[in-house]
């Protein structure tokens, strides 16, 4: 018999915090890529897509007249942990142009082990050879299994391995399940 457990949720960012983080990341991307030429923002399905859309929209406002291509990538078939989890395509990949020579900003909601980012990098290679790939995430929770580090981070959040981190436009919630002693 499994011991009883309790579930606790902690909101660490609200909607305004998310908006400010995405705005700050957008400004950092513009500052770092003033002379980068073609800039393509690619959201990882499904968690990074809404963030990528906001970043692309912000950049077009920050730098009037700058064209920012926006796309999405589904990494399901590129994962190296397929034997550990079922392959469920999230949504279609839509890369708007050949990535050869472009600077790609890859966007996801949470960076954890780095395996999703590794899969996304492999998927991007099917669409050309980018000049550079930069990584933007809202939450970096640590526990990396691969040597991957984000270029742009909304918030670094120390977590336990068993925690679940949910990021959405309304905020960031950490869910923790704890064993409760019976007695």
Image: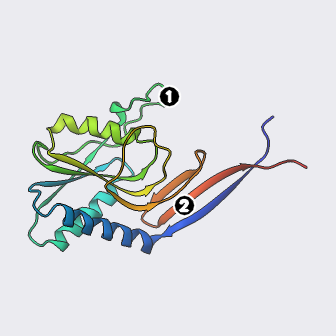
Label 2: which residue? 173
Residue depicted at x 22% and y 45%: 94
Q: Secondary structure at mark 2?
A: strand
Residue farthest toward the right in the current orientation of the protein: 183
Q: Residue placed farthest to the front in the image? A: 147
Residue 128, how many percent across, how many down? 14, 38
Given the current orientation, which residue lies at the most extreme top position?
Answer: 83
Judged from the image, the secondary structure of the residue bearing numbered disc 1 is loop
Residue 45 spot, x, y in % from top left: 34, 47
Q: Decide: few, some or many residues near mark 1? Use Cα within 10 Å; few <14, some 14-19, many ≥20.
A: few
Q: Is 27 or 49 nearer to us in this picture?
A: 27
82 and 144: which one is in front? 144
Residue at the spot 50% in from the left edge and 62% down from the top edge? 172
Q: Quadrant of the N terminus?
A: top right
88 vs 49: above or below: above
Mark closer to the chain start, 2 or 1: 1
User: x and y percent of residue 13 in the render?
Assistant: 49, 68
Q: CA distance from mark 2 to mark 1?
A: 25 Å
| Residue at the image position 27 percent from the left and 34 percent from the top | 122
Q: Quadrant of residue 36?
A: bottom left
Q: Which mark is residue 84?
A: 1
- Residue drawn at the location 34% of the way across and 31% of the way down: 77
Q: Quadrant of residue 33?
A: bottom left
Image position of 155 (left or right of 94) = right
């Amino acid at each position: 018999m499994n011991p009883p457990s309790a579930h606790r949720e902690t909101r660490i960012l609200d909607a305004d915090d998310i908006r400010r983080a995405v705005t700050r990341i957008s400004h950092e991307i513009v500052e770092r890529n003033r002379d980068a030429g073609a800039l393509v923002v690619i959201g990882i399905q499904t968690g990074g897509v809404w963030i990528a859309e906001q970043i692309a929209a912000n950049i077009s406002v920050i730098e009037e007249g700058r064209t920012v291509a926006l796309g999405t990538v589904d990494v399901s078939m590129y994962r190296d942990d397929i034997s550990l989890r079922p392959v469920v395509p999230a949504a279609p990949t839509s890369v708007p142009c050949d990535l050869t020579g472009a600077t790609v900003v890859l966007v996801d909601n949470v960076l954890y082990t780095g395996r999703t980012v590794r899969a996304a990098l492999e998927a991007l290679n099917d669409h050309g050879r980018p000049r550079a790939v930069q990584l933007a995430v809202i939450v970096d929770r640590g526990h990396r299994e691969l040597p991957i580090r984000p270029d742009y981070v909304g918030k670094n959040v120390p977590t336990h391995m068993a925690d679940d981190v949910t990021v959405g436009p309304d905020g960031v919630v950490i869910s923790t399940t704890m064993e409760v002693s019976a007695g």
